[in-house]
Image (spheres, rainbow, N blue to C red):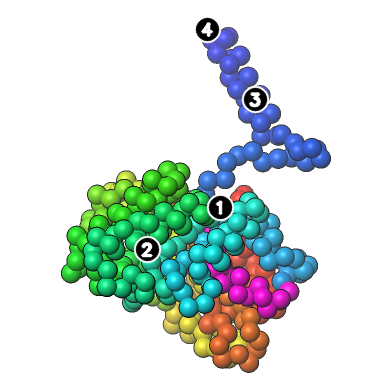
Amino acid sequence: MIRFGYIILFCAAFLGLFSACQKDDAGKPVDTEEDLFIRAVDISYWPVIRDYHLDFYNLNGAKEDFIMILKNSGVNTIRLRLWVNPDEPYASLPQVNSFARTLQSAGFRIWLSLHYSDTWADPGQQQIPSAWLGAEHDALNDSVYNYTTRVVNQIKPDLIQIGNEINNGFLLPEGDIYSHKIQFLQLLNSGIEAVRNANGKTKIIIHYAGLEGIDWFLDQVSDLDFDVIGLSYYPVWHGKDLTLLTEKIKEITINRNHDVMIAETAYPFSLGWNDWTNNIVGLEEQLILPEFPASQQGQRDFILEIRNILSETERGLGFCYWGAELVAFDGPQSENGSSWENQAIFNFDNQALPVLEAFSKNLK
C-alpha cells in the first residue's frame, strides 16, 4: 500500500507539472491556472474619451492601444456603469452593450453597476428614472425586474450590482431604507430575482460606500440572495485607517456568508492638474501620510496594499480602481474636462503609471 501510494503521488505530481507547462501552437508556455481574483478597473467614460483620438503609451513608453495596455498589465475585469434613460447616449444600454461586447471579445470579464437612475446614483442621490416616476409600488417592482432581465439577457455580465452605493436605499423616495424599508427590500429583491432567473452564473453584488453604518445595513439585507458585499473605499471620504479597513473586511467575511471586495477605490499620483477643471483631490490633508504620498510610487503602493488586504482575506474576491481612464481628455485649458486626471492610471502625458503593476496576475 505504501509503494502504491508513492506511485499515485508521483503520477499526480507529474500530471500537475505537465498541466502547468502546457504550450500553445507556437511553443510558448500557457498559464492554465484559473484567474479568479478580480483585478478590475472602471473605465465607463472611455467610449466618450475614445472619440478624442488621444494617443496612449504603455509602461515602457511605447504607443499602444488603451484597452490592450490594460489587458497586458493584468487587468481581468472591466466595471461599467449603466443608466436607464440618460439624456446622452453615454451610459445607456445600447452604448454599454456595444462596449461590453468589445471587451468580452478581448477576454475581459464584465462587471455592471446598475444605477437604476437616469444619472449618477450614490449616497447623496438616488433618483427614480423619469420613465418610472409616479408608478405604484407593484409597477415599480415590475419595472426593476423587467429592466434588469433585459440588461442581463443582452450583456450577460459576470458580476452585477443591484444599485450603486445604496447606503440610504435606491429609487428614492419609494426605496428609502429608513422610511420605506419593506419597499426597499422588495425592490432590491426584484433586481436579484431577475438576475437569478436570467443567468444563474452571474454573481450579484450589494454595493455600500465606506464603513460607517455597514453592520446595520448588512443586517437589513441579510435575508436577500446575493453573493458579494462590495465596498467603496476612498481615504478622502471614508477614513485613512487601513488597519480598520482590514479588520472590518475580515469581520464581515467571518460574520456574513458572502465574499467581499473593494468595488471602488482610487489614489492620486500628483496633487497637480492637467486642465482647468477643479479636481476632487488636491490637498495633502486628503491623503494617508506619510505612508502614501501623492506620487507615482505612493499611488502604486496604496493600490498594492488594497490588493494585499483582499488577497490575504479568505473570502476576499478582489478590487476595482475607479476612474482609471479619466485623463485630461479635453485639453489643458478645459473647464469641462476631468476632475480626476491626477487619480487616473495614466500620467499627464497619457503614459501608463506604475500603479498598473498592482494588477499583474503574478506579482513579483
Q: Tag on residue 15? A: 3
Q: Amino acid at mark 2?
A: Gly
Tell me the quarter of the picture where residue 48 sits.
Answer: bottom right
- Residue ID for mark 4: 1
Q: Is residue 213 visible?
A: no
> Label 3, label 4: how many angstroms apart (C-alpha)?
21 Å
Mark 2 surroundings: few (<14), some (14-19) or many (≥20) residues within 10 A: many
Q: Is residue 35 visible?
A: yes
Q: Amino acid at mark 3?
A: Leu
Report whether 350 appears left or right of 340. Answer: right
Q: Nearer the viewer, residue 12 or 341?
A: 341
Please report whichever mark, 1 or 2, sits nearer to the chain's N-terminal start.
Answer: 1
* Residues in magenta, as a range: 38-55
Residue found 34% across the figure and 61% down from its top: 143
Q: Amino acid at mark 4?
A: Met
Secondary element at tag 2: loop
- Comparing labels 3 and 4, the label whose residue is closer to the camera: 3
Please report whichever mark, 3 or 4, sits nearer to the chain's N-terminal start.
Answer: 4
Residue found 51% across the figure and 51% down from its top: 156
- Residue ID for mark 1: 109
Q: Is residue 290 magenta?
A: no
- Comparing labels 4 and 1, the label whose residue is closer to the camera: 1
> Label 2, label 4: how many angstroms apart (C-alpha)?
57 Å
Report whether 86 appears left or right of 11. Answer: left
- Residue ID for mark 2: 163
Please report whichever mark, 2 or 4, sits nearer to the chain's N-terminal start.
Answer: 4
